[in-house]
Amino acid sequence: MKKTIKDIDLSNKKVLVRVDYNVPLDDKQNITNDKRIVATLPTIKYLLEKKAAIILMSHLGRPKGKVVPEMSLKPASKKLGEHLNMNVKMAPDCIGDEVNKMAKDLKSGEILLLENLRFHPEEEKNDDNFAKKLASLGEVFVQDAFGSVHRAHASTQGVGKYIKEKAAGFLLEKEIQFIGDTLKKPNHPFLAILGGAKVSDKIDVIENLMDKADSLIIGGAMAYTFLKAKGFGVGNSLLEEDKIDTAKNLMQKALEKKIRILIPMDHIVVDKVDFKNKKVEASAKIQKTEEADIPSGFIGVDIGPMTIQRIAPVIMESKTIIWNGPMGVFEIDEFAKGTIEIAKLVAQATEKGATSVIGGGDSISAVKKAGVSNKITHISTGGGASLEYLEGKKLPGIEILPEK
Ligand code: AMP
């Protein structure tokens, strides 16, 4: 287990915390969703209790190494201040004389937010000098930006080389516990539900689960590549031709390892759909297939009722469930049923004692849409990071932290 902020002395120390305040902003720089800020409150409140002087750093958007005023973190400092009912100081930059002075003058119980790290190209290059300058601001480094730990950047990894005292914040600790530890020692039966748009995005996850999972449910557009590999017709559904052989190999491997792979046996299909704007016209023909084949001229957009019935008991018997990616084009209400039903089943299985871990932005919205978010054991805050964690990769922003 990695060291956490509970394992180190923080009192009256300057604590540099990497947070993920990559929040969505509207064109007037209003934060449209502040869950990433809210997610850091437990760590920040704990540091305040311990009388630390807190220096927060984050990136926002992709300014590509230049100052882009629309991507300033100022709105985040204001929002954080509102949540804590205190003033959060905003630095004009993340390095430089003025920032050094502000950090030096910061008193215990005060908070300073540095300006967007990615205004400097050195951040993403993990430049040593830049990392050293950031590191010089604090005596302790706290990693709490799970959404960014899969990147080896100056603020997520480099800085850790120059600060001796380092630890995980509470947000990161939870992610390590629920994703990392769950994967290391899952209770069986262990089920992975994978959906979403592309097989290519999830191949490594499937590969990594081959030695651990008992069952795999494959839904979403990636299912059609598996169906095609089995010789079924997929009509005009989204298909990755170049991944058909990969799908075949994965299914063969699963057979050898006695892992059950469940792919859809019926579908909701439509003759035309606007994927880009997630819209279906009133004149579109929507129908259920009674079988795994998708008729030509039609596009698969959700798993059908027979599939849901078939996978329900598999979900209910599971003791560990990880889920990444929706079962269909759930953004369109007519095609959201499969995903919502799965969300409800995962919630029910959790109530029966299973551990459920959900990652990826889309699965999270799906669970919300189903109204069962509070019944899931752990909803991961990082999309790309949780996927790489599920792939079994070592994440640089976690690796840099010492063990207890
Ligand atoms: P991902 O980011 O890989 O988890 O993919 C999520 C996206 O996959 C969502 O925007 C869904 O609309 C999309 N998706 C799921 N099922 C399908 C499908 N059958 N056809 C096209 N797109 C799909």
Image (cartoon, rainbow, N blue to C red):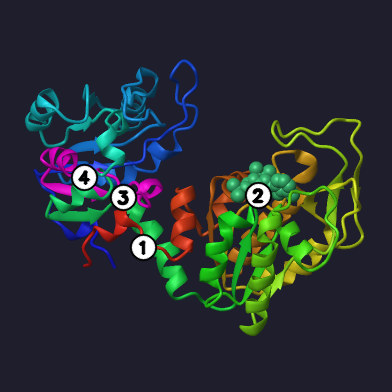
The answer to whether residue 370 shows anywhere in this view is no
Question: What amino acid is labelled 3 in the image?
Answer: Ala
Secondary structure found at label 2 = loop
- Give the magenta-colored segment's residue range: 128-154
Residue 215, quarter of the rendered image: bottom right
Query: Which residue is located at x 12 percent, y 23 percent?
Result: 98
Q: Is residue 76 left or right of residue 110?
A: right
**Residue under label 4:** 47
Query: Which residue is located at x 15 percent, y 57 percent?
Result: 8
* Mark drawn on residue 394: 1
Whether ligand 1 has any atom under 8 Å from the Cβ at mark 2 is answered as yes
Q: State yes or no: residue 133 in magenta.
A: yes
Relative to 210, is 40 above or below? above
In this view, the residue in front, 323 or 194, is 194
In this view, the residue in front, 335 or 259, is 259
Residue most extreme to the top:
28
Q: Residues within 10 Å of mark 2 (few under 14, many from 20)?
A: many
* Label located before the other in sequence (1 or 3): 3
Question: What amino acid is labelled 1 in the image?
Answer: Lys
* Label located before the other in sequence (1 or 2): 2
Q: State yes or no: residue 95 in magenta.
A: no
Q: Residues within 10 Å of mark 3 (few under 14, many from 20)?
A: some
Quarter in which the C terminus is drawn: bottom left
Q: CA distance from mark 2 to mark 3?
A: 26 Å
Query: Which residue is located at x 11 percent, y 55 percent?
Result: 164
Q: CA distance from mark 1 to mark 3?
A: 11 Å
Secondary structure found at label 3 = loop
* Mark drawn on residue 152: 3
